[in-house]
Amino acid sequence: MDKAELTALLTPQGLRMIDEVGPLASTAEVAAAVSRLRAAGHSPDLVSAVVGQAHLRVRAEGKFGPFAERMLFTRAGLEQATRLEVAARHAGRFRAAGITRVADLGCGIGGDALGLAGIGLDVLAVDADETTAALAAYNLAPFGDAVTVRQGLAEETDLDGWDAVWLDPARRTAGHSETSRTRPEDWSPSLDWAFALAERMPMGIKLGPGLDRSLLPDDVEAQWISVDGSTVELVLWSGALRRDGVARSALVMRGRAAAELTAAADAPDEPVRELGAFLHEPEGAVIRARLIGEVARELRAGMVAEGIAYLTSDAALTNPFVRTFRVRDVLPMKVPAINAALRDRGVGTVEIKKRGVDVDPAQFRRKLALRGDASATLILTRVGEGRDAKRVAVLAERV
């Protein structure tokens, strides 16, 4: 979105037109709306801005639910925004620590500020990009004087009078549509600046879940978060926002349910054991937090192989931190053997998972003879240890 589109959008006519156009879910609907609005004599800038917002609002429903119907976005801003249910949990941590005034630095389109203001906290929302700050101001306007939005740099923000900071450093190249990830040394503000501030005041720092663990300070709580099967972020909590005795945590959210695993340090793995009646796939947040061993001990399970993030057990146990599968067949990882087993069971629909083997699931699927009404999960992995390690195909069903 350029400045001309933003100017056209933030007018009574532009905002009214978004509501009149309604949701645009498909490319065909977008093209038809553009043709209709241009034929009605509207300017190219206004048409582009209105149609773009109508399409982005549909995409935003997954993160913001019904709130998306009155919000404004850039494509990059939506992709990088925190899901509202996650933002609400972050906000709850600030309130539980007795904090009432939070500076949200790198606020983007205002996703986290929505969560903070939504539970009654005062918020200062700051973003370096002029367009993004303008959209944040619109999205946060319903909170009135409780939220102040400014355009500026995090490093230059006066934090006097604010109790704590929420920081989302810019980790991608600048832009409102196509962006790419940058290296930690190129982030704005830098990690060194963020960590220095975290030593002076309570702070939550939102980062990508794949951050090099050697960069983690010793005096923070590192919390990895998975939502509906995807590991979405890592948050580092400092000061009063860090929980006593917790250095590693994995928050797993599915639908409206949430569960959390915490520990004082990385958990040692359980030993490798022979493949049993059940195979467990830990959530990404658990793997990133290195708490697989904690889950294994609760499930009376062991590792299928060294360095492979699958667990196996004979106990009919599961929990929110894994996806559990009942093992039906263990086959050599050879297409003829797998096809024979699929044919015998009448499997016409298969979900393919893999860890520890160099296989492209999409290409592998094309080699399978899928016929029948049954469905199954095919897990391609390595089991055993040392010279006894081997590649196998596990035919399983979800528990």
Image (tube, grey):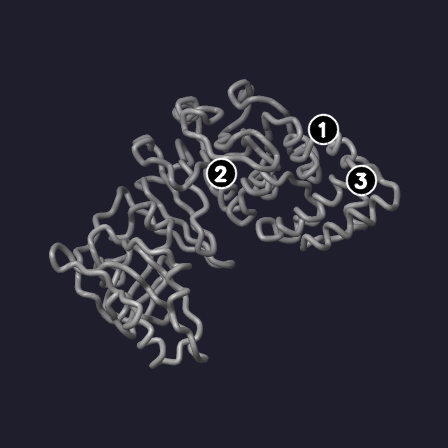
- Which disc number belongs to residue 94? 2
Dot 1 surroundings within 10 Å: few (below 14), some, or many (20 or more)? few
- Disc 1: which residue: 3
Determine whether, in the image, residue 117 is placed left or right of residue 251: right
Tell whether label 1 touches label 2 (CB within 8 Å).
no
**Which type of secondary structure does the marked residue at label 3 adopt?**
helix
- Disc 2 marks which amino acid? Phe
Quarter of the image for residue 322 reads bottom left
Q: CA distance from mark 2 to mark 1?
A: 35 Å
**Residue 14, numbered label:** 3
Position of residue 374 relative to residue 264, above or below, is below
**Mark 2 or 3, nearer chain start:** 3
- Image quarter of residue 178: top right
The local crowd at label 2, few if under 14, some if 14 to 19, many if 20 or more residues have their Cα within 10 Å, is many
Residue 296 spot, x, y in % from top left: 25, 58
Which residue corresponds to the image point at 74% horizontal and 40% vertical from the top-left?
48
Q: Is residue 187 above or below residue 110?
A: above
